Amino acid sequence: MSKFEEIQKVCLRRGIIFPSAEIYPTISGFFDYGPIGTLIKRKLIDYWREFFVKSEDNIFEMDGSLILSEKVFKASGHLESFVDPITQCKKCKSMFKADDLIKELTGISVEGKPTEEMNKLIKERKLKCPKCKGELSEVRLFNLMLKTEVSPVGGQIAYLRPETAQNIFTAFPRISRAMRAKLPFGIAQVGKSFRNEISPRHFIVRVREFNQAEIEMFFDPENPACPNFEKIKKKKIRILSHEAQKKGKEAELMTVEEALKRKILPNEWLAYFLVKEFEFYKSLGIPEDSLRFRHMLPEETPHYSKGNFDLEIKFEFGWKETVGNAYRTDYDLKKHMKFSGKDLTVITEDGRKIIPHVVEPSFGIDRTIAGILLHCFVEDKKRGWNWFKFPPKIAPFMAAIFPLVSKDGLPEKAKEVYEMLRKEFDVYYDEKGSIGKRYARADEIGVPFGITIDYQTLEDDTVTIRDRDTTKQERVKISELTGILKSLIDRKN
Ligand code: GAP
């Protein structure tokens, strides 16, 4: 069993993440987060918000509706261009994303190529359904948006949003005015997006309902300087350029200043976000060599973008895009201005009427969680159980409180400690089973510290703190426990 499969087993057993409505035959690509998964997801989003929104004084957050009128997607180009090539097995009726299937069977990348080219390859190479060897249908384009009809009398076609970005563009004039925002400024949004993926796969990596965290950073194209660029220009990130991809080379570690000079990156704003993303993912426990920014090839680049840099995480099944970074220029605002007839321009400090340009970092929260689960998972033969080395910032609980035995007044004392700590931290109390089993259960969901109340506690008001990563124990006074736990958490974060 692969590591990722092992992780999925833990997620099911501990109710962390599991298929939605699983008591019925399930629809693939939909997952529920249980209590532990919800804590991890909430903490990840809170951390993202601290790191990317609250730390900046010119980024505003909004929370828009999930269902949007068809008109929005006519304007944005999604009705026409948000498509994937699909082929179906004529025998077993399995559906395949044609470009993925061709790559899998021949090693040839046809992403973004016309369907005729895919059909030609299928015919020439006599490609068959990998499941039953049945004949494959003609490749056709399939729109990934989920359609619905609003209002009881019908007729109002709408779509579940395939990205959170369109709320931001359509709310742009109101928010910029209401917040008296001056360029450059950003609008961020965290929320659900929906895509009718042809073949959901790899657990929560490709699903049909997922969480995104996006920022649209609006700036004046005639004044594209990022005020913080000086601070970060010497920071290095790993970039897989077009040239490296053509030559089959590895990603190169370079400063963003150099990447701009070599015209790999299009502007300072994108450089700024890439540096922050690199730091963010490293701080979540993903090693540097399992992270890279791939400059998407022109044929793969989305219809709205003048350059995309995907932050990719290395999985067992290959590198997977986890953050899409796009230079969307004025594409969306221009289109919405044309289709809505509303004025989406702004007046610059020097009196010019312009449509701002936009860079967009678009994070997949579920894919980020999948990456964290994989890279924080420790297969530990010596300890006898596997565990997650989550940094405390996203661990579901900071500590577990254990009475050594469930008698002689230890549970009562342990509950006092629990009541004291829960005012400050996410902690839980556990008195079931042997202490070894309880350590294992806590390690398995990545709880950084275990606090044990034993017979000595009754004598001198001290407890032991066990460190998840080293299993070492330290005895401390209950009166100092909160402060000590805080500093231990900070050190591990
Ligand atoms: N607004 C731009 C946009 O949505 P994207 O590259 O299509 O760009 C951004 O998506 C991120 O959303 C991806 O990098 C990925 O992490 C996540 N994402 C996209 N489709 C997904 C899916 N079907 N399942 C899980 N995550 C997905």
Image (cartoon, rainbow, N blue to C red):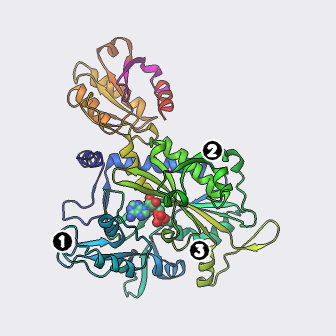
Q: Which mark is residue 235?
A: 2
Q: Which of marks 1 and 3 is in front?
A: 1
Amino acid type, callout 2 = Lys
User: Which percent across, then down, holds residue 15?
Assistant: 27, 48
Q: Residue at x 40, y 83 (%)?
A: 151
Residue 332 visible? The answer is yes
Give the class, few, some or many, for how many residues have Cα within 10 Å of label 2's Cα (few <14, many ≥20).
Answer: some
331 or 259: which is nearer to us? 259
125 or 288: which is nearer to us? 125
Q: Nearer the viewer, mark 3 or mark 2?
A: 2
Vertical side of 475 occupied by 289: above or below: below
Residue 481 within the magenta-colored segment of the rendering: yes
Q: Residue at x 66, y 44 (%)?
A: 234
Amino acid type, callout 3 = Asp
Picture quadrant where residue 337 is located? bottom right
In the visual, does 291 lie left or right of 37? right
